[in-house]
């Protein structure tokens, strides 16, 4: 059956049972912050959040990841690959915007000849259980970027909050297999499904923030030397908040560190950091915030569009909320989209 | 008779200024004054040369204790290097102890070239204190 | 407040039209309730954008360093002190900055409001006298402003800029009673073990986004120590040891310069209470060297000088 239903009070039971077979990541509330953590008896799931502070990309693309280690022996150097993540995982409670970000990240990490085994290896073993948004925030603009509060892209199952219970909609075969493990789940009634449909329409109407990206990519083609860039970058601090909290941003730096020989690690990097494009020669082709801000906008709304067919943004609004100086990407894209076509 | 398990001995990194403290340590050696062998000496031209990063890096690398020793105020070979260092070390020590690094891990002393006895005493005291604290665990990078 | 806003617009208009400055740095309305955003005005008619209210939390002195042109800056007490520190450190000629001093009664801490409202979102907010009125989907609340100000503002001893070229409005009454080091003192009485566990827990949340560093006007180094290679002093991963050292060293680097403006704590997306470190540094400088940063352009910061009689009780 495509539609099942579970009472909210039974969710902890479901998660507990899941945790026996899978590594389960759930939103956990600590003080006032909700983030995805590994489920354990001390780390219970909290599903009444608007959205998590950090996006769930870190389940597949952690802030720090060891690529391999090496040991220097007497006569040779031994390189030890990092063990592949073999455990089956479930990430439960992913909002549709964040689930959609996985689809975009997949495009990025699997493109070309050399596929990113670290990211893809984890993606392969993971089931995504989404959680639809009944109450989008005022900063959410997912509908402008191909998403929606009850969207199913990137998920295997979608939980829909219909008051005292969750409707469980099966989206993929993998989701279907997961549901089969819980034969005690009841089939949904027609009334449940209709209620969810109504909530979905309400939620979609509740997304008031609209950002037109229709011609933005094309307009950006002609805007490399535009005076817009001179204005918008000035208040930017050049920190990494927008990039680190963005579900689709995935630039990384690779470093070698010492430690019983050594290890090669990759860490999150930000195109807004001043050293991002600093070259070994000392030359920096993006010397100021102006070039860096231009690059960010162009990457998200022009380069990615040309390479992969869609904008590299899911409209989650985290960058808008968390930017220390309230630099609003919606304003920038809006300014570009209202440019005359010529 | 060999002990299967040797008792743990702390390793102390000592930055000694060339003109006073290093000479004082040398004097202790020449005078055959016995003091614990737990220190490893790095000779620096002046205590003012010691960058706070060295001290923090030493703790990160697992050194159980750090000692920085220079000339007495007024006697610095470079006139005021130790005076500059004094303020720096004061702030660093206060800050590290506030964050939770145990009191006694990071030490400072003034030892002149004639104070072989004092040097031996300082090292003995520092080793005793650090031994009581146990192996360094905080800030150590695994 | 409105009077001050209008006065700011008048004063800045005059400065621009008389060409006394090339640019005005101030605040304009943000895109979200209770937010303002830094604003760079170079045309006299654009001064209408400038606002002044309890959401003017950004540290504008950050945007002064590195500018070649003459700027006029709408400046709160903490901002003025930071401009003074940067001027003493020769980051720009003092004559290039016109400090437009404004009395500040404290800025609102959005994180405190978010914590109070839990999952509810503020869609509209007005600040009137001592009250913050917030409205959202299905709720309306009136919050007493003094309970939702930033912690650094609650004990601020410089509501009026100690250094300024012109002053807008009337001087605000200064707080004399509050003990600004009460949080630090409560940590100092704990054992080293307890403090270690506390800082370990707080700093393990850090994602190394450097919002703290980049929002601080004093962190103007072209190459920050964390980015340095050859030698790479400390790692850039979220390894706990490296992360704690980053914060310890950053606190050390602002010793004798930090004025507790609170920008670092406000900027942190992971809600780390960075002021527990920076406030301690301030306390050390005050107790050891009797120094308060940024109140005088004549004084040299403590780590830039020394005295024969400096305390040395910690030296064997």
Image (tube, rainbow, N blue to C red):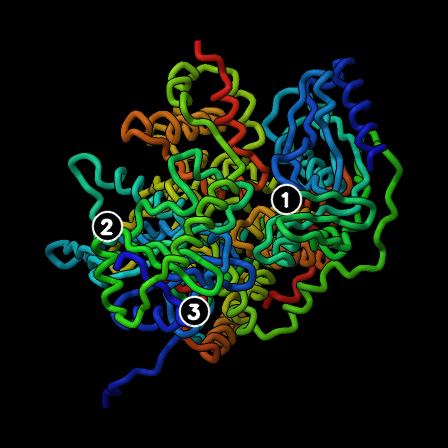
| Left-right relation of A266 to A230 | left
Label 2 crowding class (10 Å Cα cut-off): few <14, some 14-19, many 20+?
some
Label 3 crowding class (10 Å Cα cut-off): few <14, some 14-19, many 20+?
some
| Left-right relation of B100 to C72 | left
Residue carrying label 3? A43
Q: Which mark is residue C299?
A: none
Percent x, y of residue A113: 15, 36
Q: Quote the CA–CA distance across marks 2 and 1.
A: 41 Å
Of marks 3 and 2, which one's residue comes earlier in the chain? Answer: 3
- In the picture, the quarter occupied by the C terminus of chain A is top left
Label 1 crowding class (10 Å Cα cut-off): few <14, some 14-19, many 20+?
some
Residue extending farthest to the bottom is: B1
Residue carrying label 2? A118
In this view, the mark in front (2 or 1): 1
| Left-right relation of B58 to A229 | left
Residue A10 seen in render: yes
Percent x, y of residue A82: 21, 56
Residue extending farthest to the left is: A75
The answer to whether the residues at label 3 and label 2 have Cβ atoms under 8 Å apart is no
Q: Quote the CA–CA distance across marks 3 and 1.
A: 31 Å
């Amino acid at each position: 059956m495509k539609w099942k239903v579970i009472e909210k009070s039974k969710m902890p039971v479901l998660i507990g049972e899941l945790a026996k077979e899978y590594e389960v990541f759930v939103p956990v509330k600590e003080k006032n912050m909700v983030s995805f953590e590994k489920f354990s008896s001390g780390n219970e799931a909290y599903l009444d959040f608007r959205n998590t502070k950090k996006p769930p990309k870190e389940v597949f693309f952690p802030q720090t990841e060891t690529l391999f280690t090496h040991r220097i022996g007497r006569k040779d150097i031994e390189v030890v690959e990092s063990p592949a993540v073999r455990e089956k995982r479930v990430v439960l409670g992913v909002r549709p915007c964040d689930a959609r970000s996985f689809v975009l990240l997949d495009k990025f990490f699997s493109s070309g000849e050399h596929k990113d085994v670290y990211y893809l290896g984890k993606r392969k073993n993971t089931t995504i259980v989404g959680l639809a948004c009944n109450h989008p925030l005022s900063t959410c603009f997912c509908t402008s970027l191909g998403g929606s509060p009850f969207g199913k892209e990137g998920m295997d199952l979608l939980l829909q909050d219909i008051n005292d219970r969750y409707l469980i909609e099966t989206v993929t075969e993998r989701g279907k297999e997961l549901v089969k493990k819980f034969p005690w789940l009841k089939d949904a009634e027609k009334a449940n499904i209709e209620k969810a449909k109504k909530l979905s329409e309400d939620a979609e109407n509740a997304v008031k923030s609209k950002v037109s990206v229709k011609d933005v990519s094309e307009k950006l083609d002609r805007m490399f030397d535009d005076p817009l860039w001179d204005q918008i970058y000035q208040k930017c601090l050049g920190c990494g908040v927008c990039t680190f909290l963005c579900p689709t941003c995935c630039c990384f730096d690779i470093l070698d560190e010492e430690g019983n020989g050594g290890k090669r690690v990759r860490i999150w990097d930000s195109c807004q950091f001043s050293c991002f494009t600093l070259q070994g020669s000392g030359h920096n082709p993006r010397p100021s915030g102006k070039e860096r801000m231009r690059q960010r906008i162009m990457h998200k709304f022009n380069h990615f569009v040309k390479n992969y067919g869609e904008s590299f943004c899911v409209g989650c609004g985290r960058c808008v909320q968390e930017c220390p100086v309230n630099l609003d990407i919606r304003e920038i894209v809006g300014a570009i989209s209202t440019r005359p076509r010529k | 008779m060999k002990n299967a398990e040797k008792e743990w001995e702390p390793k102390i990194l000592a930055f000694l200024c060339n003109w006073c403290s290093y000479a004082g340590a040398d004097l202790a050696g020449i005078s055959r004054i016995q003091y614990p062998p737990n220190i490893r000496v790095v000779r620096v031209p002046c205590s003012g040369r010691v960058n706070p990063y060295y001290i923090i890096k030493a703790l990160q690398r697992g050194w159980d204790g750090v000692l920085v020793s220079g000339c007495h105020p007024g006697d610095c070979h470079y006139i005021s290097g130790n005076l500059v260092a004094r303020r720096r070390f004061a702030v660093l020590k206060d800050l590290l102890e506030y964050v939770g690094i145990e009191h006694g891990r990071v030490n400072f002393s003034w030892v002149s070239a004639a104070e072989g006895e004092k040097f031996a005493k300082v090292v003995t005291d520092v080793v005793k204190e650090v031994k009581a604290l146990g192996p360094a665990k905080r800030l150590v990078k695994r | 407040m409105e009077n001050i806003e209008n006065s700011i617009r008048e004063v800045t208009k005059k400065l621009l039209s008389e060409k006394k400055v090339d640019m005005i740095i101030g605040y304009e309305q943000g895109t979200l309730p209770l937010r303002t955003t830094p604003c760079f005005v170079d045309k006299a008619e654009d001064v209408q954008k400038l606002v002044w209210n309890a959401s003017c939390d950004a540290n504008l002195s950050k945007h002064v360093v590195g500018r070649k042109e003459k700027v006029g800056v709408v400046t709160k007490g903490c901002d003025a002190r930071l401009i003074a520190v940067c001027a003493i450190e020769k980051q720009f000629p003092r004559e290039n900055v016109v400090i437009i001093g404004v009395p500040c009664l404290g800025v609102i801490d959005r994180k405190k409001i978010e914590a109070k409202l839990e999952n509810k979102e503020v869609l509209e907010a007005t600040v009137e006298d001592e009250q913050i009125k917030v409205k959202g989907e299905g709720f309306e609340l009136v919050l007493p402003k003094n309970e939702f100000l930033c912690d650094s503002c609650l004990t601020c001893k410089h509501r009026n800029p100690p250094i300024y070229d012109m002053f807008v409005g009337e001087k605000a009454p200064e707080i004399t009673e509050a003990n600004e080091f009460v949080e630090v003192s409560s940590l100092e009485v704990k054992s080293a073990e307890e403090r270690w566990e506390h800082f370990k827990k707080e700093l393990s949340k850090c994602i190394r986004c450097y919002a703290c560093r980049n929002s601080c006007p004093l962190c103007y180094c072209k190459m920050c120590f964390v980015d340095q290679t050859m030698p790479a002093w400390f790692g850039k991963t979220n390894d706990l040891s490296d992360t704690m050292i980053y914060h310890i060293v950053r606190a050390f680097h602002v010793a004798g310069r930090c004025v507790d403006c609170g920008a670092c704590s406000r900027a942190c997306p992971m809600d780390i209470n960075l002021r527990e470190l920076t406030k301690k540094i301030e306390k050390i400088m005050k107790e050891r060297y009797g120094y308060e940063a940024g109140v005088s352009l004549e004084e040299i910061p403590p780590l830039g000088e020394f005295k024969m009689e400096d305390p040395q009780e910690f030296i064997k």
